Image: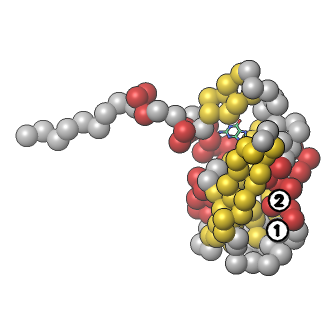
Amino acid sequence: TNKEFFVSWEEFHRATRELALRQLPADQWKGIIAVTRGGLVPAGILARELNIRYIDTVCISSYDHDSQRELKVLKGAETSDGEGFLVVDDLVDTGETAKAIREMFPKAKFVTVYAKPQGSPLVDEYVADVEQDTWIQFPWDMQLNYIAPIAESEA
Ligand code: 5GP
């Protein structure tokens, strides 16, 4: 990973709203499944835009083990095959997570906000392309020192 791509809250909000505009209206969905943790923020935005109130999570942890990546499902979702569900993550990179998601929920629609070329064929829809050798910095991972402190109330 050579380059960094910084995403602001506003940019992320706009891109996720764009993703929402491309989805079927609310009554077509049983609910949203957020892939933790990256899918949590986009799931909230999609749920609001599409007026969906049923939100489930699939909790996946990923760690490197002898230079091999291992994915561990810490918690599944309530649906068995994902039919009628919109599964969302922040991005797809190698597509390893996407493959696991597809196996778990073969009938769901899997969407991400960003996609790198290696993983993009594995998602049903995404908004923005990012080069493979780029690390995306999301606002929730950044330090807060760029935000002005909240003004103290006047005494
Ligand atoms: P994949 O399984 O497609 O290789 O990667 C999926 C997960 O890895 C993402 O959900 C995210 O948690 C993490 N990841 C991969 N690339 C990036 C990146 O460029 N930026 C950030 N913030 N996370 C990444």
Q: Amino acid at mark 1?
A: Met
Q: Amino acid at mark 2?
A: Ala
- The picture quadrant for ligand 1 comes to top right
Q: Which mark is residue 104?
A: 1
Q: Residue at x 79, y 78 (%)?
A: 80
4 or 21: which is nearer to us?
A: 4
Name of the residue lying farthest toward the top: 2
Which quadrant is home to the N terminus?
top right
Tags 1 and 2 in contact by the CB under 8 Å rule?
A: yes
Note whether residue 49 is visible: no
27 or 134: which is nearer to us?
A: 134
Residue 114's quadrant in the figure?
A: top right
Disc 2 residue: CB within 8 Å of ligand 1: yes
Placement of 54 over or under 1, stated as above or below: below
Q: Residue at x 67, y 27 (%)?
A: 5
Placement of 140 over or under 143, stated as above or below: below
Name of the residue lying farthest toward the right: 121
**Residue identified by numbered label 2:** 100
Graded by Cα atoms within 10 Å as few (under 14), some (14 to 19) or many (20 or more), the crowding at tag 1 reads some
> Residue 35 location, x and y as percent?
68, 58
Q: Residue at x 53, y 42 (%)?
A: 140
Residue 25's quadrant in the figure?
A: bottom right
> Residue 71 location, x and y as percent?
75, 55
Placement of 65 over or under 54, stated as above or below: above
Q: Is residue 116 left or right of residue 149?
A: right
